[in-house]
Image (cartoon, rainbow, N blue to C red):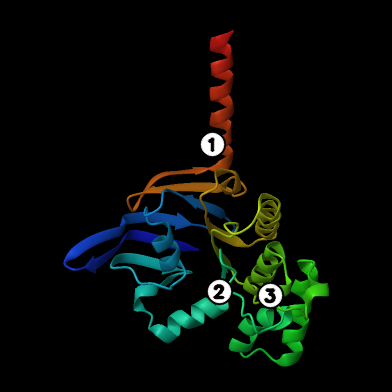
Amino acid sequence: MLNFKALSKFYLTEDIETVAIDQMDVTINKGEFVSVMGPSGCGKSSFLNIVGMLDNASSGSYRFMDTEVSTLNERGLADIRKKHLGFIFQSFNLIDELSVWDNIELPLIYQKIAPAERKVKVQAVLEKFDISHRAQHLPKQLSGGQQQRVAVARALVSEPELILADEPTGNLDSKNGHDVMQLLQQLNAEGATIIMVTHSQAHAEYGSRLINMLDGKIVSDQSIADQKLKVQMLKKEQTADVL
């Protein structure tokens, strides 16, 4: 689905160069659920912004669905974002003055979807995420967990191939965080490709693959199942040593 080849991102401030991503090579395939972890400043957000075409790489290659992203103009980038990408943010980013229904419908209006089709799509995601009874409420009338459900519904209403989630549980308590992660896991099981940035190891393990970053580089990249197996084997060895 997407491929980085020797991709770098750096920023210049007062003649000081800061490297956010350093010669990254990575491929993410359709249907994966990739969790990205690392300390603050490691390049996670820059990585997600470039994948989402909200920022440009300084050098290297980024191919998305066989298209070289660096060759696209702003209109081409916007078209891909509208048609293929769904964004879920930590801060929900709902429009306070719009109802739940109107917030979810907005991406479809931007895509110039006909009103009748919009109605069908919005109703479908409201039912899917169990928020139909909140359709005419404003965001301020919802709990944090409900607001994030609306944000996820908005991201999914246009049926994107790729979902980008930036700390989607960061503003939620543990129960609502768990609920959102189960929702993402369900979407992945239904075929959605997901890239999620998180600080939570527990939430990262809802994915199928874990990438750890440090200083703009990938320092480890492994399947979640393999990682869990290694931990189990290590615990068995430690228990055997004690006995």
Asked where in the image residue 107 lies, by quadrant, the reply is bottom right
Image height of 226 relative to 163, above or below: above
Image height of 23 relative to 154, above or below: above
Q: Tell me if 243 is positioned left or right of 129 in this view.
A: left
What residue does disc 1 label? 227
Asked where in the image residue 77 lies, by quadrant, the reply is bottom left
Q: Which numbered disc flags the more N-terminal residue, 3 or 2?
A: 2
Q: Which residue is the extreme one toward the right?
A: 133
Label 2 to label 1: alpha-carbon separation: 30 Å
Label 3 to label 2: alpha-carbon separation: 26 Å
What residue does disc 3 label? 139
Q: x, y (%) of residue 25?
A: 36, 55
At horizontal 41% and vertical 48% (from top left) the residue drawn is 39
The disc at residue 84 is 2
SS for dot 2:
helix
At horizontal 70% and vertical 62% (from top left) the residue drawn is 145
